[in-house]
Image (cartoon, rainbow, N blue to C red):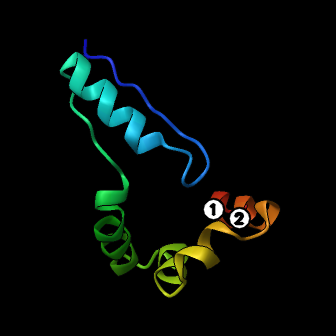
Amino acid sequence: MKKIYFVGGSPCAGKSTVCEIIAKKYNLYYFKVDDYLDKYMKKVALNKDTLCKKNLSMTPEEIWMRNPVIQKDEELGI
């Protein structure tokens, strides 16, 4: 069974830089969600996902700088 490692954290914390170094050092496949996020959001929005449609019309700052409580409620559908 293959192992998958997830790395998360605040924007601009250096996640990509660290992951690229680790992937190179240990010959791992590095999948950066940011490189595919726009494509996936558009695809899901076409399937009538209202949150994805809303996010497509927002700037990155509007998306990530929302009040954390509101962000949680919107993204978890609470």
Q: Quadrant of residue 69?
A: bottom right
Residue assigned mark 2? 71
Find residue 14 and report its horizontal and vertical position in percent.
Answer: 49, 43
Query: Identity of the amino acid at label 2?
Result: Gln
Identify whether 36 is placed above or below 22.
below
Find residue 28 and report its horizontal and vertical position in percent.
Answer: 22, 24
Residue assigned mark 1? 75
Query: Identity of the amino acid at label 1?
Result: Glu
Q: How many marks?
A: 2
Using a 10 Å C-alpha cutoff, classify the residue at mark 1 as few (fewer than 14 neighbours), some (14 to 19) or many (20 or more).
few
- Asked if disc 1 and disc 2 are in contact, CB closer than 8 Å, the reply is yes
Find residue 21 and report its horizontal and vertical position in percent.
Answer: 31, 30
Mark 2, secondary structure of its residue: helix
Q: Of 16 and 64, which appears nearest the observer? A: 16
Q: Of 29 and 55, which appears nearest the observer? A: 29
Q: Quadrant of the N terminus?
A: top left
Find residue 77 and report its horizontal and vertical position in percent.
Answer: 67, 62
Indicate left or right for 23 with 45 as reference: left
Q: Residue at x 26, y 36 (%)?
A: 30
Indicate left or right for 60 with 72 as reference: left
Q: Of 26 and 69, which appears nearest the observer? A: 26
Disc 1 and disc 2: Cα gap in Å? 6 Å
Indicate left or right for 41 with 9 as reference: left
Q: Residue at x 54, y 53 (%)?
A: 12
The residue mark sitting in front, 1 or 2, is: 2
Q: Residue at x 48, y 74 (%)?
A: 52
Please identify the residue farthest to the bottom as the structure is shown: 57
Identify whether 66 is placed above or below 21.
below
Please identify the residue farthest to the top as the structure is shown: 1
